[in-house]
Image (tube, rainbow, N blue to C red):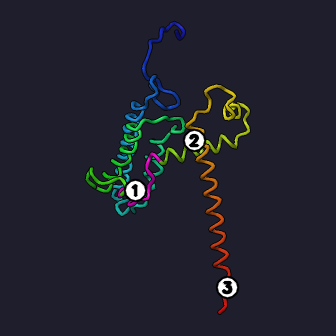
Amino acid sequence: MLGNMILGTTDNYKYLGEVINFKRKTMEHVHQLARKTEGAYQAIIATGGDKTLRGIQMESIWSLIEKCIIPIVVYGCETWTLLKGEEKALNDILDDIIRRILFLPGGTPREVLYMETGLIDIKHQVMQHRIGMARRLDKSSNDLIEMFLDHQIEGSWTKETDKLKEKLLLVDEEHQCAQLVERERERERETVYFP
């Protein structure tokens, strides 16, 4: 009950912009994202098709995709537990938009789309967001967050998130190695060799 109203049961509810199913399936949310991205796509096409912007560069279109479409699709993705079908549906949303912009047939391989545009597919966007969230949480000095991270609250930090923390450590190690290699290359460029 809410005041004098009797609330019925529901299979789906919306929380922080995400449609959540009682079975933890996000397909309804994916369908909602497809509708939102279609609206953003139509706005981009209308902008790009404007007579004053006729000569717009493709880099600008890809920048609009990165700034308008991808954030709609990955909003709140840090909390998702995607099934293979849901992951494929999310990737299909972006793939379809890219194909439509480039006037490519539906059977064009995904790899070609991303090599041509320089964009990152949704699966890897989600991974980046999760790693970023794990990094922010790891650096937090909030006592409640620390209790979650240290497993002091039952069911708070899942195995999946532990795997993300491991990936974060690997990414940090790879980043440090890349920095060392770059410093070594800079030293080699600065070193003058005399015959």
Q: Residue at x 28, y 55 (%)?
A: 104
Percent x, y of residue 135: 64, 45
Vertical position of residue 54 compared to residue 65: above or below: below
Q: Amino acid at mark 2?
A: Lys
Labels 3, 2: front one:
2
Q: Amino acid at mark 3?
A: Val
Q: Main secondary structure of the magenta part?
A: helix
Percent x, y of residue 43: 38, 47
Q: Residue at x 55, y 37 (%)?
A: 160
Residue range in magenta is: 112-123
Q: Amino acid at mark 1?
A: Tyr
Q: Are marks 1 and 2 in contact (CB under 8 Å)?
A: no
Q: CA distance from mark 3 to mark 1?
A: 40 Å
The residue beneath circle 3 is: 192
For the residue pair 104 and 53, the one nearer the viewer reads as: 104
For the residue pair 90 and 152, the one nearer the viewer reads as: 152
Upstream in sequence: badge 3 or badge 1: 1
The residue beneath circle 1 is: 114
Vertical position of residue 94 compared to residue 191: above or below: above
Q: Residue at x 58, y 45 (%)?
A: 131
Quadrant occupied by the C terminus: bottom right
